[in-house]
Amino acid sequence: MHLKFIQTVLILSAILTAAQPQAPAQAEIMINRNGIQLNGKFYISEGSGTFPTVILLQGFPGNETDVLGIGMKLSEVGYNALTFNYSGTHHSEGEFNFDNSQKDVEAAFNFINHPENITKFKIDTTRIILGGYSFGGGMALTYAANHPEVKEVFSIAGNDHGAAMIEYQLNAERKKMLDDIFDELKSRKEIQNS
């Protein structure tokens, strides 16, 4: 896994600096996680054949577009990229928490492997890559550690969720700050749903 991680990072670096981009396209998508709808985007690589696909995880709380412009750049150089908002963030349904975020990643894999989406987005299912930025980088590594079927993973400035949880438990000021953020997210969702 370690060697594959380094190889994937080197490939990602080469892709992001490639000189001959193609014209990218994007599609608004909804990922269904057992009845919970997750809002997302799919950056589609143009051309013939099938394409490797990157599941690109947002930081926290993320945004409703791209992750650092990486999804668009990947689609320009021959990779599809899927990004989405975690449960309970932005316009995605459900409640935000660590467990749900891991389930959201699984739902993204299910979306990628759905026969209709394989055809529609020309997905090479032998090359599914998981990665993310900040919170999403940590989520990608956590998911990959528990799912040996994930063969390629990368993390950009990934959060160490274990260390973050220890800090949360031991530092009252940090705990309050994070609790306030989660309360604000819940309030926003309640306002959106009313």
Image (cartoon, rainbow, N blue to C red):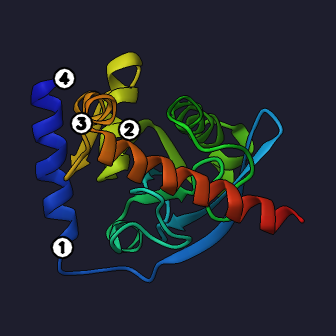
| Residues at marks 1 and 4, CA–CA distance in whole angstroms | 25 Å
Report the mark closest to the observer, 1 or 3: 3
C-alpha distance separating marks 1 and 2: 27 Å
Closer to viewer: mark 1 or mark 2: 2
Q: Going 56% across and 36% down the picture, which residue do you hit? A: 109
Label ID, residue 1? 4
Question: Residue 135, position in %: x, y?
Answer: 35, 48
1 and 4 marks in contact (CB < 8 Å): no
Q: Earlier in the sequence, mark 1 or mark 4?
A: 4
Mark 2 residue crowding within 10 angstroms, few (<14) / some (14–19) / many (20+): many
Disc 2 secondary structure class: helix
Q: Is mark 3 on a helix, strand or loop?
A: loop
Amino acid tagged 3: Asp
Q: Which of marks 1 and 2 is nearer the N terminus?
A: 1
Res 18 label: 1
Task: Measure the alpha-carbon separation of dots 4 and 3.
Answer: 18 Å
Q: In which quarter of the image is residue 153?
A: top left
Name the residue nearer the viewer: 164 or 80.
Answer: 164
Q: Mark 3 points at which residue?
A: 160
Decide which of tag 3 and tag 2 comes sooner along the chain: 2
The mark that comes first in sequence, 4 or 3, is: 4
Marks 1 and 3 sit apart, C-alpha to C-alpha, by 30 Å
Residue at image x 65%, y 51%?
88
Compared to 106, does 183 lie above or below? below
Q: What element carries label 1?
A: loop
